[in-house]
Amino acid sequence: MAYIGEIAALFTSFCWSLSAIGFTKSTQQVGSLVTNRVRVVIAMSVLIVINAVLYGQPVPLHAGASRWAWLGISGVIGLALGDAFLFQAYQEIGARLGLLLLSLAPVFGALIAWIFFGQNLSLVQIAGIVITLGGISWVVMARPRAGDENTRKVTGRGVLFGTLAALGQATGLVFSQQGMTAGFSPFAGTLIRMFAAVLTLWIVAAFQHQAKSTVNSIRQHPSALRWVAFGALFGPVLGVSSSLLAIQHTEIGIASTLMALPPVFMLPISYFLFKERFGWQAVAGTLLAIAGVALFFLVKI
């Protein structure tokens, strides 16, 4: 199928925008830690069913130790740690700004490749980094409209959490590429990553004596469970799987650029669904940041 990678990348952006809605609603009710722990369990359960139906094997035991290691590490860094920071950002500064900061992930990914794999950065790519950072800074520093109670206050904690989320996603994607060779199934790859995330999050919860309180919290807020399930379907199930499909069938630069579009999708969503009011600076800064990501990857000299 022509352009399957590009279509998968665009679908990824759409899914991540929808998942941000569900996880933002959930974190407002039960907090980011509970949301993260519950959503990986839901996602893992759905992926087990999908793998059983599609491949006749619920768990990809045939994948090999090397693939399990690469994807497992990716799951711990990207899904357990990175998304934990992302949900904290949603709780602090909302989905729109959280996703905008997440658009730094392609930049971090390229910097990681430069530092650890010796991949050089051209002047155009450096310009793309500067433009992206400038656009994000513009949005973060824009003053909220006077008298608007629905506009979230930008906090240093929220910006830090969003930045760490982008770093976690970028690092996780680098490890995912190593495990997704030879046309390996995106659903199987996502399930391996999810297994690692579930083990990490729930072992930590057990040591902190928070496993039981997590279950009780979600029982007391059934609407939060529905939002978590909604976010899990469009995030770690469909979104993450389609992102792995994208990097398999198109260049990482093109895929990363198209997968950086959720902040653009979130502008109308935030306006109509969350009743958030923002000035033209927020719109212009968001578009500038995405243009920087596009320039960073798509312009070659």
Image (cartoon, helix red, strand yellow):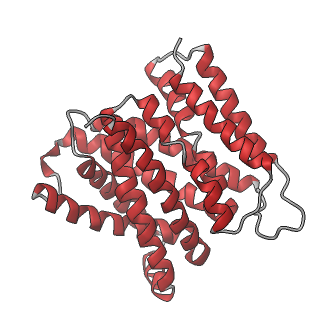
- Residue displayed at 51% across by 22% down: 114
Observer-nearest of 90 and 258: 258
- Furthest toward the right, the residue is 146
Residue at the spot x=36%, y=56% of the render? 238
Instruction: Report the side of 161 relative to 18 (left or right).
Output: right
**Farthest residue, direction left:** 56
Quadrant location of residue 206? bottom left
* In this view, 25 is above or below 255: below
Looking at the image, the residue that sits furthest to the top is 301
Image height of 292 relative to 32, above or below: above
Question: As rendered, which of 48 and 8 lies closer to the eye?
Answer: 8
Q: Is residue 81 visible?
A: no
Residue 285: x, y in percent?
A: 73, 41
Left or right: residue 148 versus residue 230 is right
Q: Which residue lies furthest to the front in this view?
A: 2
Quarter assignment of residue 203: bottom left
Image location (x, y in percent) of residue 18: 49, 61
Horizontal and vertical percent position of residue 1: 25, 37
Identify whether 12 is placed above or below 66. Answer: below
Residue at 35% across, 48% down: 242
- In the rendered image, residue 103, in percent from the top left (x then y), is placed at 58, 42
Q: Quarter of the image holding residue 191?
A: bottom left
